[in-house]
Amino acid sequence: MAENSSETSGSVHRRCPTHSSPGVGASKWIRLNVGGTYFLTTRQTLCRDPKSFLFRLSQADPELDSDKDETGAYLIDRDPTYFGPVLNYLRHGKLVLNRDLAEEGVLEEAEFYNITSLIKLIKDKIRDRDCKTSQVPVKHVYRVLQCQEEELTQMVSTMSDGWKFEQLVSIGSSYNYGNEDQAEFLCVVSKELHNQSYGTNSEPSEKAKILQERGSRM
């Protein structure tokens, strides 16, 4: 928790062993300075995962090189924005993230502090998120172009910006040029839409559907 907050719990837990002085205040509360932001929590909270960096910190592990600032808070050079969810997970066992907080950022902190259960939880959450994203159907916009026979080759060869030829429908002869009838066609083209707000043009129009059905019977 932040410095001006307090942590309360209605449950009674056994105190984890400590190598600090026997004073009640010194043994229960620990102050952390994470990237310039202060957090106040209990030794009991930091002892949730006995394999974690925070457990060793709370035990004053002599092999752990940990400095303190002038207020006596442990100095941790990490991003405080992502430390909040990590500390809250140790408090109540749930992963709670704000909408604007990336799971990958919290995963980095969980791996740094070596909190194995939280690492697994976040990886599962990221996997589920990516799976849902990959299952989003591809949207298309369709257009119907009218052209004469002599214009077909040029029109198809000059299509760009992701437009793709879908179907060609003959609508008969429109005019006579010399001694030859010039056939007229409707050309259906499509384009994928990526990361856009899909409007009414994201699906084939009724006219395009009718033309496709007519073309499939020809």
Image (cartoon, helix red, strand yellow):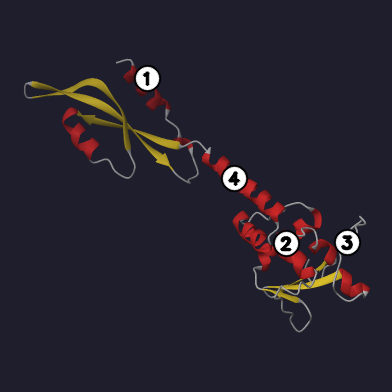
- Residue 61 vs 174, above or below: the answer is below
The residue positioned farthest toward the top in the image shown: 217
Q: Quadrant of the C terminus?
A: top left
Q: Amino acid at mark 3?
A: Thr
Label 1–label 2 contact, CB within 8 A = no
Q: Earlier in the sequence, mark 3 or mark 1?
A: 3
Label annotation for residue 8: 3
Q: Amino acid at mark 1?
A: Glu
Q: Earlier in the sequence, mark 1 or mark 2?
A: 2
Q: Quadrant of residue 105?
A: bottom right
Q: In the structure shown, which secondary structural element does the residue marked by tag 3 occupy?
A: loop
Place of residue 86 in the rendered image (x, y in percent of width and height, measured from the top left): 72, 60
Q: Earlier in the sequence, mark 4 or mark 3?
A: 3
Neighbour class for label 3 at 10 Å: few (<14), some, many (≥20)?
Answer: few
- Residue 196 vs 27, above or below: the answer is above
Residue that mark 2 sits on: 52
Residue that mark 1 sits on: 213
Neighbour class for label 1 at 10 Å: few (<14), some, many (≥20)?
Answer: few
Residue that mark 4 sits on: 127
